[in-house]
C-alpha cells in the first residue's frame, strides 16, 4: 500500500493506492488556506477508512514541485516527519509530470508540454511523452530532463499541445492546442510515484527534497532584490 499527498495544486489531497495503482481512498479539499490544518486529519481519515496503519504503508509519495513554495513545503515536511517516525521510504513526484499525466488520462495526449504559472513573468515548463501508461520526461542532448523556467511569451520548439495553467502565458504556434482545466490530485501523484518506486526505489527523509527551480523562492522579494 502507498500513501500519496499533494498540497502544491492549491488543494489538500490525500490518496491510498495498492501496488497496482488502484485507488483505494481519495479525498481532495480545494483551496490552500487550511492545508496545514487539513493534511494530518485527512491522512488519519484515509487510514481509518481503509483499515490500515502507517506500518502497512510501503512508501510515502508526495508532490516535490515545482510550484507554490508554501504548498511544496507543507507536503514535503509532512512526508519527512512521517518517514522519520515510521522508517518509511519517500518518493517525490514532479508537479509538471502530474499535469502531463492528467493530460493523458483526461484527454488522451501521448505527448505534451506542461506549463505551470510561476508568477514573476515566468512559467515552470517541461516536456513529457507516454511510455507504458506513464508520462515520462523527455531528455535533452545532455541527458537532462526539460524542467526549466521560461519567460512569459516564450515559444516552444515543437507544435504540440500545452497543458496547465501557464499554457496561455506562452506564445503559441498556429493551431497549437492548450488544456488548462486539468485536475491532478494525490491519486495522480500516487500512480506516478508507484511507477517511480518500482523503477528506482525510494529515498530516506533527508533526501526527500523539494524542487523549486527558482532557487531563491524561499526569500522575500526584498531579499531577492526585486524591490
Image (cartoon, rainbow, N blue to C red):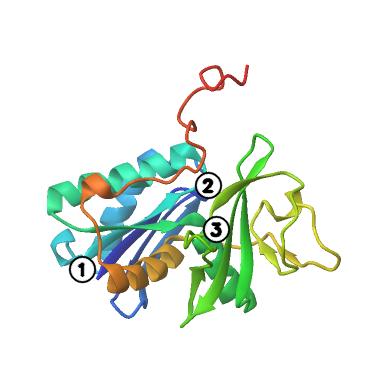
Instruction: Give the mark toward the camera: 3 or 2.
Output: 3
Which residue is rendered at x = 29% and y = 75% of the image? Answer: 18
- In percent of width and height, residue 41 lies at 30, 49
Dot 3, how many residues are within 10 Å of its Cα: few (below 14), some (14-19), or many (20+)? some
Q: Is residue 41 visible?
A: yes
Q: Quadrant of residue 23?
A: bottom left
Above or below, comparing residue 38 to residue 21 in the picture: above
* Residue contact between numbered discs 3 and 1, judged by CB atoms under 8 Å: no
* Residue at the outermost right position: 174
The numbered mark, 3 or 1, whose residue comes first in the sequence reads 1
Q: Nearer the viewer, residue 122 or 163?
A: 122
* Count of numbered labels shown in the rendering: 3
Dot 2, how many residues are within 10 Å of its Cα: few (below 14), some (14-19), or many (20+)? some
Separation of disc 2 and disc 1 at Cα?
Answer: 28 Å
* Residue at the outermost front position: 141
Residue marked by disc 2: 10
Name the secondary structure under disc 2: loop
Residue marked by disc 1: 51
**In the rendered view, does 199 fall on the left or right side of 95?**
left
Q: Nearer the viewer, residue 53 or 66?
A: 66
- In percent of width and height, residue 20 lies at 32, 80
Disc sitting over residue 146 in the figure = 3
The numbered mark, 3 or 2, whose residue comes first in the sequence reads 2
- In percent of width and height, residue 117 lies at 63, 46
Separation of disc 3 and disc 2 at Cα?
Answer: 24 Å
Which residue is rendered at x = 51% and y = 65% of the image? Answer: 139
Name the secondary structure under disc 1: loop
Which residue is rendered at x = 30% and y = 54% of the image? Answer: 43
The numbered mark, 2 or 1, whose residue comes first in the sequence reads 2
Amino acid at each position: 500500500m502507498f500513501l500519496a499527498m499533494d498540497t502544491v495544486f492549491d488543494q489538500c489531497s490525500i490518496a491510498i493506492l495498492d501496488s497496482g495503482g488502484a485507488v483505494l481512498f481519495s479525498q481532495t479539499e480545494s483551496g490552500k488556506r487550511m492545508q496545514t490544518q487539513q493534511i494530518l486529519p485527512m491522512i488519519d481519515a484515509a487510514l481509518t477508512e481503509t483499515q490500515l496503519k502507517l506500518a502497512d504503508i510501503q512508501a510515502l509519495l508526495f508532490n516535490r514541485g515545482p510550484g507554490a513554495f508554501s504548498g511544496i513545503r507543507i507536503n514535503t515536511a509532512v512526508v519527512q516527519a512521517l518517514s522519520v517516525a515510521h522508517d518509511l521510504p519517500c518518493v517525490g513526484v514532479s508537479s509538471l509530470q502530474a499535469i502531463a499525466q492528467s493530460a493523458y488520462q483526461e484527454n488522451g495526449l501521448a505527448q505534451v508540454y506542461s506549463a505551470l504559472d510561476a508568477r514573476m513573468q515566468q512559467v515552470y515548463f517541461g516536456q513529457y511523452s507516454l511510455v507504458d501508461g506513464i508520462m515520462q520526461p523527455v531528455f535533452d542532448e545532455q541527458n537532462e530532463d526539460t524542467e526549466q523556467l521560461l519567460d512569459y511569451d516564450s515559444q516552444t520548439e515543437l507544435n504540440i499541445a500545452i497543458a496547465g495553467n501557464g499554457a496561455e502565458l506562452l506564445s503559441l504556434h498556429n493551431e497549437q492546442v492548450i488544456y488548462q482545466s486539468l485536475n491532478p490530485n494525490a491519486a495522480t501523484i500516487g500512480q506516478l510515484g508507484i511507477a517511480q518506486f518500482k523503477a528506482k526505489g525510494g529515498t530516506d527523509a533527508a533526501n526527500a527534497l523539494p524542487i523549486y527551480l527558482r532557487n531563491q523562492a524561499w526569500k522575500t522579494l526584498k531579499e531577492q532584490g526585486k524591490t
